Image (spheres, rainbow, N blue to C red):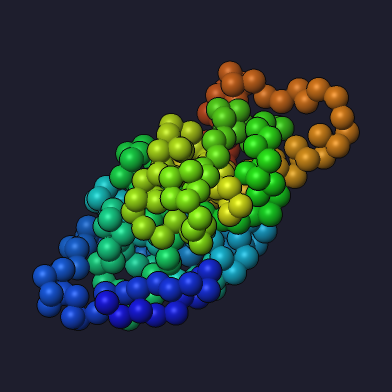
């Protein structure tokens, strides 16, 4: 296996070499041709997350292949604000690339593949290290839904501590077994925190996953402010969260259109 320096996490990522295919590990087949607008939307999602302060040089977003539930699409290893439609690669759910075209893959693509394997209802995943969320993963202070846009948080936000199963690691979800441990903690929720690392937001579509990633970060900031004010925090109840989330799943597209225009897509 040829090793390449990864632009993400200053770690190593790998891509399939011709020798891999010759050694009996053929690349997975493509799930089929995808409309150009899909690649454009994934590039837009990457840039939106950067523009909204959710990702910086690191982090990534993916979506399930529209014609094959056993494939997903995400950028090659690249800073999210630089992603273009031409950078999108296709993977099977074990995170093997269909055609790397000479590009490197994100080391933490296993976050995405594992969640798609475990949750057929999830069609988009965003992973970030957004700064205001991380303290909640460190302290164990439960995240609560501060306002209606963050309604999905009212269902609960579990914390994945990679050390519980894997001991001392580099903290990265760099293989399928670590991905499976993460998706087991996510369980049936929409967002999972990663201790001393970041978080993952999911959704039934790309727009919802981006919406939830943005509002997870905003909600974290608001909760810190509310906590500093002191007293009881009258957060959304689970039922209020359920009702508000239904509205957001449609209204979120308005935010998507605005955010997309801001990044020139
Ligand atoms: Zn990460």
Question: x, y percentage for residue 31?
Answer: 22, 57
* Left or right: 41 as drawn, with respect to 47: left
Nearer to the camera, 30 or 37: 30
* Left or right: 219 as drawn, with respect to 182: right
Q: Is the residue 148 above or below the residue 218 in the image?
A: above
* Left or right: 60 as drawn, with respect to 216: left
- Check the picture and name the quadrant holding the C terminus: bottom right
Q: Which residue lies furthest to the front in this view?
A: 167
Question: x, y percentage for residue 53?
Answer: 67, 58
- Residue 234 visible from this viewpoint: yes
Question: x, y percentage for residue 224?
Answer: 78, 40
- Residue 244 visible from this viewpoint: no
Q: Is the residue 156 above or below the residue 90 in the image?
A: above
Nearer to the camera, 138 or 92: 138
> At 13% across and 75% down in the image, what residue appears?
23
> At 68% across and 54% down in the image, what residue appears?
131
> At 19% across and 75% down in the image, what residue appears?
20
Query: Quarter-wise, where is residue 42 in the image?
Result: bottom left
Tally of numbered discs: 0
- Check the picture and name the quadrant holding the N terminus: bottom left
> At 58% across and 47% down in the image, what residue appears?
195
């Amino acid at each position: 296996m040829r090793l390449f320096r990864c632009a993400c996490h200053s770690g190593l990522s790998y891509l399939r070499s011709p020798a891999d295919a010759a050694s009996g590990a053929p690349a997975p087949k493509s799930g089929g041709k995808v409309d150009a607008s899909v690649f454009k939307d994934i590039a837009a999602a990457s840039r939106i997350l950067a523009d909204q302060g959710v990702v910086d040089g690191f982090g990534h977003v993916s979506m399930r292949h529209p014609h094959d539930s056993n494939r997903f699409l995400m950028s090659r290893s690249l800073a999210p604000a630089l992603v273009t439609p031409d950078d999108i690669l296709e993977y099977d759910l074990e995170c093997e690339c269909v055609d790397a075209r000479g590009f490197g893959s994100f080391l933490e693509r296993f976050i995405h593949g594992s969640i798609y394997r475990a949750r057929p209802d999830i069609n988009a995943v965003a992973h970030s290290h957004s700064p205001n969320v991380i303290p909640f993963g460190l302290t164990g202070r439960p995240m609560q839904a501060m306002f209606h846009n963050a309604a999905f948080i009212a269902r609960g936000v579990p914390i994945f501590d990679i050390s519980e199963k894997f001991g001392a690691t580099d903290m990265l979800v760099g293989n399928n077994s670590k991905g499976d441990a993460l998706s087991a903690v996510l369980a049936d929720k929409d967002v999972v925190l990663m201790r001393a690392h970041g978080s993952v937001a999911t959704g039934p579509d790309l727009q919802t996953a981006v919406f939830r990633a943005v509002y997870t970060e905003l909600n974290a900031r608001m909760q810190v402010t509310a906590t500093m004010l002191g007293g009881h925090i009258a957060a959304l109840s689970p039922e209020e969260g359920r009702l508000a989330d239904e509205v957001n799943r449609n209204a979120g597209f308005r935010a998507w259109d605005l955010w997309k225009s801001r990044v020139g897509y």
